[in-house]
Amino acid sequence: ALFICEAALIRPLANRLLIDPIEPETERNGLWVPPETTTFRYDKPNEAAVAITRGVVKAKGPEARDVEVGDVVQFSDSCGRPIEHDGHRFLFIRTDDVALIEG
């Protein structure tokens, strides 16, 4: 699947997904994290150990299975590769990095 953005095409390869991140809702310890998807450290329950990020799939590679363009997915903030295109930030992740599909 191709994603057309201001006369340019972005085409993920293999099992990669192009993600349009959804803005997080709150901030904890300098990390922006949606509160309903935060994993807390047991030794310090007020600190986030891993921030889970949400985004919309804008394009997918030919080997990407179980995920469709338009799906809202959740994935760890430590995965993927950020890119900027036409002033907008996107993220490339592997389908293996998707924790769940919402809806």
Image (cartoon, helix red, strand yellow):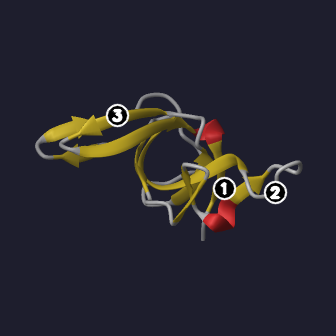
Q: Which residue is mark 2?
A: 45
For this orientation, the residue located farthest to the right is 43
Q: Nearer the viewer, residue 71 or 35?
A: 35
Mark closest to the chain's N terminus, 3 or 2: 2
Mark closest to the chain's N terminus, 1 or 2: 2
The vertical placement of 69 against 25, above or below, is above
Mark closest to the chain's N terminus, 3 or 1: 3
For this orientation, the residue located farthest to the left is 7
Q: Is residue 11 visible?
A: no
| Residue type, numbered disc 1 | Leu
| Residue type, numbered disc 2 | Pro
In space, the residues marked 1 and 2 are separated at their CA atoms by 24 Å
Q: Which residue is mark 1?
A: 100
Residue 91: x, y in percent? 42, 40
Query: Tags 3 and 2 in contact by the CB under 8 Å rule?
Result: no
Q: Please rate how many residues cluster around mark 1, counting C-alpha atoms within 10 Å: few if below 14, some from 14 to 19, many from 20.
A: few
Q: Is residue 88 visible?
A: yes
Residue 15: x, y in percent? 53, 33
Specify whether 67 is left or right of 42.
left
Residue 45: x, y in percent? 81, 57
